[in-house]
Image (spheres, helix red, strand yellow):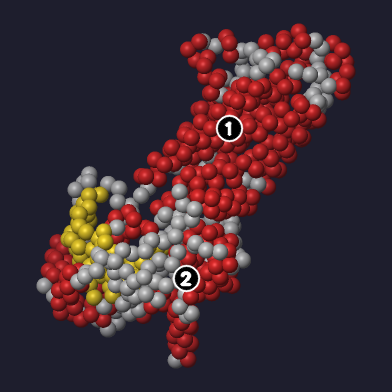
Amino acid sequence: MSEEISYEKILEDVECTAVSPGYSTLGDIVPVSLHWNNITVTTIKEKRLLLKNVSGYAKSGELLALMGASGAGKTTLLNMLMCRNLKGLSTEGTITVNGNEMAHKISSISGFAQQEELFVGTLTVKEYLMIQAKLRINGSKKLREDRVTDVLHQLKLWKCRDSKIGVIGEKKGISGGEARRLTFACEMLSNPSLLFADEPTTGLDSFMAESVIQILKGIAKTGRTIICTIHQPSSQLYQMFHRVIYLANGSTAFQGTPQESISFFEKCGHRVPDEYNPSEWIIYKLAVQPGQEKQSNDRIQKIVEQYEDSDHQKRVMEQLSDVSEKIPPPEMHRANVFTQIFALSTRCGIDVWRAPQLTLAKVIQKILFGLFIGLLYLRTPYDARGIHNINGALFFLAGEYIYSTAYAIMFFLNNEFPLVAREYHDGLYNLWTYYFARCISLIPLFSTDGLILLFIVYWLIGLNTSVMQVIVASIITVLASQAASAFGIAMSCIFPTAQMTAVMASPPLVLFRLFGGLYGNTNTFPAAIRWLQWISMYRFAFEGLVVNQWSEIDDFHSNAKNNWTNSTTNDVLDYFAFSESAIPLDIIGLILISLAFYLIGFIALVHRMKKAR
């Protein structure tokens, strides 16, 4: 008995914490009521009916649960209410918020806590919330900090505020319950009057599940309207909801309080046995049992018909007709462009530098490659064979800048696309500000690692070291890396999976490499395909490095310098069909290729994001 009292006391403390001190830093709540009438949803291709004339409502201060067996239509109804994930569906009916039809604009006045915890796992809990606060809160830095602190306390996240969220399969982070509460914390920063939650207790143990629902109930007490889907809650958890809606075969089977649902199904001839969980029993009666499809469908149809003739349905229809004032719901704050770029650049930058596969491993790789290539071509003499070897080393450098950078970057969007899609459709930022911030965040690392490789091999091989030559080689290294980065980003935006991205990126990289200049004098290639050299980043990078190397012989190579003439330079460059004045064009070419691929990537991202709505 003492254990039970202790357990109840804990849950009471959780609820008290969720409502006290009333989310003071979040500001006032404008109550909203959500009504939906005669919602019908059909798949366009198969003409399969998912929802049929479903009507209902959710009031301010209410925690409402959408329930039903798998395939009953609860997720479809939730998507309809949020106006999301409706691709390939034909929809009918009306949905209003305070009497106003909102359509896609409903995301501007509501929050959505998805079932999947989507975060940037390299950030700590507090870091992630502070960046979310910059995007969601219009106010001073102190106000954002106070609100984050308030939310951390009220959602029981204070103890793990400095813990990294974690990356599945890479780095252990916060627990499942903490991740679920962090999802709600992000949404609460916007101070929404309307909150949707998809399966908020899935994957949690019974105690954590009840604490999450208790927190949601406490949030509802502040005047918010909360709608969630839930699958077979425990008996104790079931009674926490203010109202429940049961769906079966796309129709409404019941709508009312949890206690009323028990008496209603008893009137339908399906009394809940004392030893059974009420919600499990009701869902069992509303499910189509394998091998008993006809009996199950007949039973469901009778229950639906009895509900349509019941007082519960009449009360719902009365509520739907009682919308006297069309008060426009307030829209949540959206940060300006500069704040969006700053916040997203900060988040992306932290993510890049803390990701082990992009930082430490990449730097170590470049150091090892640099030492190996430098020792392989150590102090190469400037004779006929030496010149040939040095040109081969320069092509390897260009290839390493391009190939390794492209493949290191090209999976970035596949990993974070679900998070970006959710935040973009929630109205947190413009798509171009995210794209710009993400591209900018990758520049430092993928410039630094190329320069590390260059500076290691430069003096080991014995390349010409005049100040201008070192500067030009550094510029070409940075631009070649950025062209490869732009290519990798474009591939990641175009193709939806990492496997497809890797497969489809290989042919153009091989083609660019073939036209890089080392494998043949490009002027001797057939005229019909010779133009491909002008879209090859390998060509511009290799040509720039070669022309820069042989444009001047330094004093460290005195023997070669005495015998070196303009004719010698021309002979080396003519072998590749390179021009002595090509460096400005090579720099411009690398810049244009970078801009072109960045543009292609953004267009592809916009297209994918429209399809993801």
At which x and y percent is residue 573? 69, 13
**Taking 68 as reference, is 526 left or right?**
right
What residue is shown at x 64% (from left), y 40% (from top)? 446
Give the mark nearest the N terminus, 2 or 1.
Answer: 2
Query: In this view of the protein, can residue 284 be seen by the observer?
Result: no
Badge 1: few (under 14), some or many (20 or more) residues near its Cα, within 10 Å?
A: many
> Where 249 falls versus 476 (above or below)?
below
> Where 440 falls versus 24 (above or below)?
above
Say which residue label 2 marks: 26
Say which residue label 1 marks: 483
**Is residue 250 or residue 487 the one in the foreground?**
487
Quadrant of residue 568 within the rendered picture:
top right
At which x and y percent is residue 440? 58, 43
What residue is shown at x 28% (from left), y 75% (from top)? 243
Estimate the spatial distance between the alpha carbons at disc 2 and disc 1, rounded to whole Å.
45 Å
Quadrant of residue 149 within the rendered picture:
bottom right
Which element is circle 1 on? helix
Disc 2 marks a residue whose amino acid type is Leu
**Taking 301 as reference, is 552 left or right?**
right
At which x and y percent is residue 328? 31, 63
Extreme top residue here?
Answer: 567
Disc 1 marks a residue whose amino acid type is Ala
**Taking 571 as reference, is 9 left or right?**
left
Extreme bottom residue here?
Answer: 1
**Is residue 344 or residue 264 the one in the foreground?**
344
At which x and y percent is residue 35? 25, 66
Which element is circle 2 on? helix
Q: Nearer the viewer, mark 2 or mark 1?
A: 2
What residue is shown at x 76% (from left), y 34% (from top)? 455
Badge 2: few (under 14), some or many (20 or more) residues near its Cα, within 10 Å?
A: many
